[in-house]
Image (cartoon, rainbow, N blue to C red):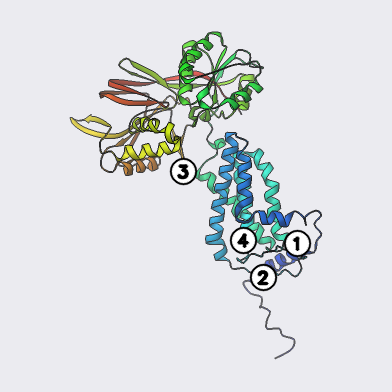
Amino acid sequence: MSPDVDLTVLKPGRHALRHRLLALDSRLFEVAAERNWPFAEPVLPRLSRSANHGVLWFAAAAAVAASRTPRARRAAARGLASLSLASLTINTLGKRSVRRPRPLLDPVPLARQLKRQPITTSFPSGHAASAAAFAAGVALESPAWGAVVAPVAFSVAMSRVYTGVHFPSDVLAGAALGVGAAFAVRALVPTRAQTGPPPRPRANAPALPGGEGLVVVANRASGSSDRVQALHDELPEAELVECEPADVKAELEKAALRARALGVCGGDGTVNAAAATALRHGLPLAVLPGGTLNHFAYDLSVEDGRGLARAVREGAAVRVDVGRFTAGDRRGIFLNTLSMGVYPELVRERERWAHRIGSWPAEVLAAVRVLRTDRHPLKVELRGETHPLWLLFVGNCHYRRMGLAPGRRTDLADGQLDVRVVHGGRHPALRLLSAALAGPLTRSPAHAEARVRRLRLTGITAGTPLAYDGEVIDVSGEMKVEKLPQALTVYRPLP
């Protein structure tokens, strides 16, 4: 064999470009190892270790959520969801697909090396993927918090090269995968910015720079004192009235007599009462979310006192539709939904247990108890035959399914009632689940929907429960449901 021929070197061929890229990657790793990184030695190895098993990011999510704003909590949840998807992809596909060995530690100074070296394959970097996924997920929901988290995520990614456990391409691939995971989560569960209602039709409302003329009635039972105080800090001249649930309607009536604008803080039922009062007195309404779900406020893109205060100072407002129902001597309005069938019974069952075991356990227990019953809450007549129904849902404006997220309204003034029914039959839990999953995306045999401007129901059995905006009453006989287009003026921070 000729001494001039080295048979250990692969001949150039179809993989020549890959070999050149790997050689460049190795050279970049060596340059990084030889380079002096000022102030990095006491920080980056510790930072790299703290990110093991996602511990750093769970702590960061807790810190972000501790700010107690709805957007911060959503940002933390989105960051963790993105991290989870990225980690799952890395561990099931990434590490198994490319079995690249870790870099040799010879060029890395001993002071930089981790005390415990990883034993998995090198490509791609799981730490970089988790860091990028968490930071991107947070930023997609809250750019401000994303700017806070991004430098930490970048440092964690760079620490993997600094400590010698990854090549630069491992880190880049992991970061790209992490960002992709964040966008995949956003496709499944859109951010508020994607689903916010259009700022129309705009309305004239008094601009109250210091809040003078705004009277805010807050339901003390909703536990929203901190939000009310935050609003008062932004609008020091506004009048705040905190009261017990039984006194809310009376206090709203008193406030309407001396207010230029009526404000409310509480859950959906409290907001409903305030809307009815504002309609009677022709006042604009300022809604500060203070309940558990806050459907109406969030669909208005009002999340906290700061955004609401900005709208009140600028006089930024829109007109929204209101739903109205009449059933015998019973009448009322709804801003969100009206329903008959399983849901009102679930609400009543939940209220029986909530004060004993808490809201969420009571929700689960109520669902189990209601769905296990073998009777149909509603019956309708069609062509002389009686048919059972499990649920009748009427939404004030069209509820759109966005990915896997629950339905949200992107237009609060479309002039329509969103009517949906779940037909009765055997296996109620399965039917309701299939209808919920089908939503507006597909047609399900158990599920039907229509959008109308008015609805008339007859032959309602006496004592049938009706739920609207979280309140439950009994109705019977005939019921009419109609729209009041653009009837209510509400403050909304405009983009």
* Left or right of residue 19, residue 331 in this image: left
- Packing grade of label 4 (10 A; few <14, some 14-19, many >=20) is many
Marks 1 and 4 in Cβ contact (< 8 Å): no
- In front: label 3 or label 1: 1
- Asked whether 187 or 69 is in front, the reply is 69
Pointer 2 residue: 19
Could you tell me which quadrant the C terminus lies in? Answer: top right
Which SS class for mark 4? loop
Q: Secondary structure at mark 2?
A: helix
Classify mark 2: residues with Cα within 10 Å, few (<14), some (14-19) or many (20+): some
Task: Please provide percent x and percent y for residue 349.
Answer: 36, 32
Q: Nearer the viewer, mark 1 or mark 2?
A: 1
Q: Indicate which disc, 2 or 4, sits on the residue closer to the N terminus.
A: 2
Under circle 1, the secondary element is loop
Which residue is rendered at x = 50% and y = 45% of the image? Answer: 188
Q: Who comes first in sequence, dot 1 or dot 4?
A: 1
Q: Secondary structure at mark 3?
A: loop
Residue at image mark 3: 404
Q: Is residue 256 above or below residue 166?
A: above
Q: Amino acid at mark 1?
A: Arg
Residue that label 4 marks: 124
| Residue for point 76% across, 66% down | 108
Specify the amino acid type for callout 3: Leu
- Residue 231 at x, y = what percent? 62, 23
Quadrant where the image shows the N terminus: bottom right
Q: Based on the displayed image, in which of its 4 quarters is residue 212 positioned?
A: top right
Mark 1 surroundings: few (<14), some (14-19) or many (≥20) residues within 10 A: some
Mark 1 to mark 4: distance in Å?
A: 21 Å
Distance from the alpha carbon under mark 2 to that under mark 4: 17 Å
